[in-house]
Image: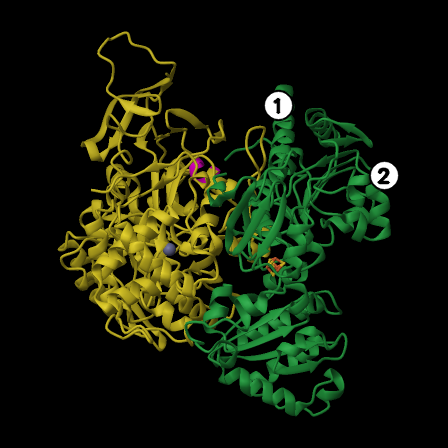
Chain colours: A green, B yellow
Amino acid sequence: MSTTEAATETAPGLRVVQDATCTFCGCVCDDMELTVEGDRITKAKNACVLGKAWFFNHHVEDRPEALIDGQPAGYEQAMDRAAEILLSARFPLTYGLSDTTTEAQRVALAITDWIGGIVDTTTSVCHGPSGIAFQGVGEVTCSLGEVKNRADYVIFWGGNPAESHPRHFTKYSLMPKGEFVPNGRKDRTAVLIDVRKTKSAKAADHFLQVKPRRDFELAWALRALARGVELDPSIEETTGISLETLEEIMDGMKKAKFGVILFGMGLTMTRGKHLNSEAVLALARDMNEHTRWSAKPMRGHGNVTGADNVVSWSTGYPFGVHLGSGFPRFNPGEFTASDVLARGEADAALIIASDPMSNFSQPARDHLEGIPSVVLDPKLSDTARTASVAFTTSTYGINTGGTVYRMDDVPIPLRPAFDSPYKSDLEILRGIESRIRQRQLAESLPDPAASGA
Amino acid sequence: MSSLRITGGTIYDPANGIDGDVGDIWIVDGRIVEAPAEPDASADRTLDATGLVVMPGGIDMHCHIAGPKVNTARKMIPEEKRTAEPVRRTRLTRSGSGGSVPSTFATGYLYAGLGYTTAFDAAVPPLAARHAHEELEDTPIIDKGFYVMMGNNHYVMKQLAAGEPGRLKAYIAWLLQSTKGYAAKLVNPGGVEVWKSGGGNVHGIDETVDHFNVTPRQIIQGVASTVQELGLPHPVHIHCNNLGLPGNHATTMDTMKSLEGYRGHLTHIQFHSYDGDPDDQSTFGSRVPELSEYVNSHENLTVDVGQVMFANTTSMTGDGPLGYYLHQVTGRKWFSGDTEMEAGCGIVPIVYKQKSLVHALQWAIGLEWYLMVDDPWRIAMSTDHPNGGSFQAYPEIISLLMDRERRLEVLAGAPAAVSDRCTLKDLDREYSLNEIAIITRAAPARMLGLAHKGHLGPGADGDVTLYSPDDDIQRMFELPRYVVSRGEVIVDDAQIMRDTRGRTLYVEPEYDPDAVDDIQAWFEKTYSIQFRNYPVGDHYLQDPLVVPTS
Ligand code: SF4
Ligand SMILES: [Zn+2]
């Protein structure tokens, strides 16, 4: 990766990396100026509090290259063992992928295809419902630079960007002066819709406190108003927001030149799930009969958008893909990782840069703990602790280059700050893939799935 | 050194004037060479092509196979993918999904399986160039590249309005270098920007684009002349304004006339050849006779067709307002994606039905184009995959072109009014194998300025397709006997024998480095990413080949 030309040596042992990228949240800010002293980042200009924590708390820990059944091991031995585990599995599961580069994601897809497993990403536990809603109604959306340059009406729905995506307001959606909104914040109206008044409310002109689990009804009411349908004032009892307020909001939405709805997991992971996302996507779509509107899910993890893209271009489906029949099949709920594990189905797992042992349901965790697993993580996560083979990896964006897709699908290159003694996900996965391929091709078994072009 | 000899085949190599002669082809280290002088010379491998039809590898000069809109379409249509024939994993090859928008690995294998060895994605927004390259790297076997959308680019429009041709020239060269793209593409020039800035569209080439004070005509002429000055191998590639609208023939004619004095390629011309009243679909008809006559008499122009076929497919376009129009007409789900400073995008699933007057006319209008352009060197086969249909329909289109009876049979199953509104039933022309070899290989290579492709003379890429002659023409072209890529047998009797990677083709036109300051100043004011993170690094390219400018 030709990513190091960014660094300039200012004093012996002190380097500054310009235009580096923070992968901590879906904002994927690529304007970091990192000061590096040896193997520490000591300054991270332009980073928010979360970004600073991400960069400063990154130390190269003194850990073995890998652990096999809890015992220290070298990479070569661990890759051999990992390949063995994956090759002997009948129903292997690949999961995670959202905190690594697309280059590594692509190799993970190759491995899963060659061994006929399931591949799923953290999308299935965050914005999976938005993905499903998208398949139902489509989506009218735009890149974040369009929001910056044009948006004069911005609705944040079911999220708290001030704390989850701290630079979203300043870099993209509220504060920046844009080509068609030259006065920045003054040219924009901001609305926050949420069940509770979070820190983000301070940044908004209007805060609409929706009753818990009534997001769908609220979106539907706005769709009705957009279409000119008369609503009963009892809508206030249903949604917690008065008809008058709704009408005022809709009036503003129609008068806007370019509106955008940025929605979070408060919408997608509460009652209604993908129906909520569908309602909001449909609302933004319908508004195009009046003026231009877009909608966009606020994706969390650094490269979860890259994972969606890689899984989609490799298989045709965005997440929860079964490759065990020799071709891709998609069925969320059936082929999504937490469900596969909770039903006790997978017999081996390859977990990349994710910690399901800390956030999956108890039955899923119990099953994962009981099957052989290969885990790649820079840290000794709960999942790595229970792994049959746990690789210590370098950290993407800090130690290794590659590509990350921002929440609006814009691909951004990484400029690493300093070398790690550990291998990257890409190198380890390539090592595992080549071992698997050597074995498969050497065995030269007649392929049951062999068929024509 | 590895060598391959293909002996005794019936060769169609129109670029070298070979029309059905029996002969041998020698390939050494991936390139075609003169047959050795020694009579007993032998090759590492010999393919007996006796009785087989031999053509250069196929070239698809306009398709949508990589990048954000293609991938968004994949995500959007699980219901279609579920019923489509999948591509199964083999010992050597990856699995994939099929249908109108196959996954990347499937796309490479399916093209190779049809005897196509080169394909160009026709519409990549520069900001997503890195994404397109990543997908192309996962698209096996075929050589590939893409065209860069610039017809609604703010910097382009600003330089045109300011009368700064020097800056425009530097920018286009810089943009192609930064994206590692192959050609300049205009999509509904100016109209997409109007859509992005509040809805609507432009309706003719002399309307002014809001905020920018330029007209589509200025964009077309400005980019056409700049591309020519830069000496790019392919002229400006134009998707005209008003795609799909009844009565759009006038805009198309205006566009062609505006290109007088410049070279230009008009793409998916079928979608731009309609008679009728824009507000009334029932008035729909063909204006191919006069448009094709204009093309026949103007050598500066080339076209590809964008044939419509009756099937389920997915419309995907950089023409944002067109996506909205299709959504309104079909009522189907709709994706729209605006890219800052650069482009738009629209995706809508669509079904083309033989029983629909409009759809059947679109089908007939495409065939009229193939049959009414006299010189096959100036027309290339395309379905605008997947817009009019899948590239997998090429064998069927070939059979329609070679067999008048078959056309009439299909026409008989369409609404009777189709024949009143176009001339298809009166067109007797039937394509020869030589002409098929031109419109699927030799002509697209020439239009693209690819001297090493589309023919079988010494120095050409060792890309060869061998077909078993068959009375069923469609079957003949669907199942090549062998497909050879860079001198290696890739497909043998419908089996993929090797999983190769293919090459990325792009251009590197020169520009004045002093011009970059102005580009950078504009970029830093407007974009949401850092200037230095915009250009695509070399490591994204797979076995790259820079095609020279002249
Ligand atoms: S907003 Fe997100 S990407 Fe940007 S610096 Fe903060 S944590 Fe990093
Ligand atoms: Zn096209």
Question: What is the C-alpha distance between the residues marked 1 and 2?
Answer: 28 Å
Q: x%, y% of residue A435? A: 64, 26
Q: Mark 2 and mark 1 in contact (Cβ < 8 Å)?
A: no
Q: Disc 2 marks which residue?
A: A370
Mark 1 sits near ligand 1, with its Cβ under 8 Å away: no
State ligand 1's quadrant. bottom right
Frontmost residue, B368 versus B346 = B346
Q: Is residue B438 above or below residue A156?
A: above
Q: Is residue A222 above or below residue A295?
A: below
Q: x%, y% of residue B176? A: 33, 49
Q: Is residue A125 left or right of residue B56?
A: right
User: Which span of residues is magenta-colored?
Assistant: B109-113
* Residue that appears at 25% across and 50% down: B512
* Residue that appears at 68% across and 25% down: A76
The chain to which mark 2 is attached is: A
Q: Amino acid at mark 2?
A: Gly
For the question of whether residue B247 can be seen, the reply is yes
Q: Disc 1 marks which residue?
A: A438
Q: Is residue B23 left or right of residue A261?
A: left
Frontmost residue, B486 versus B150 = B150
Q: x%, y% of residue B468? A: 37, 29
Name the N-terminal-most of marks 1 and 2. 2
Residue B304 is one of the magenta-drawn residues: no
Residue A202 placement: quadrant: bottom right
* Residue that appears at 73% across and 54% down: A333
Q: Is residue B331 left or right of residue A37?
A: left
Same-chain check, marks 1 and 2 = yes
Mark 2 sits near ligand 1, with its Cβ under 8 Å away: no
Frontmost residue, B346 versus A298 = A298
The chain to which mark 1 is attached is: A
